[in-house]
Image: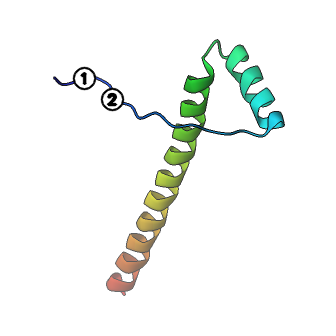
C-alpha cells in the first residue's frame, strides 16, 4: 500500500518560552502546533537550499569570467 504522505514521529522537547511562542504563532495562523513546527523547519530548509544555490551560481559566474579573460 502506498500512502500519499508518509511521516515519521519525533518527540521534541521545547523550552517553555519557545513552546509559548509556538502556541501563539499556531493560534495566529489557525494551525496546529505540528504544522507550525513543520512550516518553520521547511522555511529554514528553503533558506539553506537557496543559500547553497546562490553560492554555486556565484562560483559559476567567477569561473565564466575567468574563462572569458
Q: Residue at x 72, y 16 (%)?
A: 28
Disc number for residue 6: 2
What residue sits 43% from the left and 73% below the top? 59
For residue 62, above or below residue 27: below
* Secondary structure at numbered mark 1: loop
Q: Which residue is mark 1?
A: 3
**Contact, CB < 8 Å: mark 2 with mark 1?**
yes
In the structure shown, which secondary structural element does the residue marked by tag 2 occupy? loop
Q: Quadrant of residue 26?
A: top right
Residue 46 x %, y %: 50, 45
Give the position of the N terminus as an image quadrant. Answer: top left
As drawn, the residue found furthest toward the top would be 30
Which is more toward the observer, 69 or 60?
60
Q: Position of residue 15 (x, y in %)?
A: 78, 40
Q: In the rendered structure, find residue 15 and report the number of the disc placed on it.
A: none
Left or right: 12, with 61 as reference point: right
Amino acid at each position: 500500500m502506498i500512502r500519499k504522505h508518509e511521516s515519521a514521529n519525533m518527540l521534541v522537547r521545547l523550552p517553555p518560552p519557545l513552546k509559548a511562542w509556538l502556541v501563539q504563532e499556531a493560534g495566529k495562523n489557525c494551525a496546529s502546533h505540528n504544522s507550525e513546527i513543520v512550516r518553520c523547519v521547511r522555511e529554514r530548509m528553503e533558506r539553506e537550499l537557496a543559500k547553497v544555490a546562490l553560492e554555486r551560481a556565484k562560483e559559476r559566474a567567477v569561473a565564466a569570467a575567468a574563462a572569458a579573460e
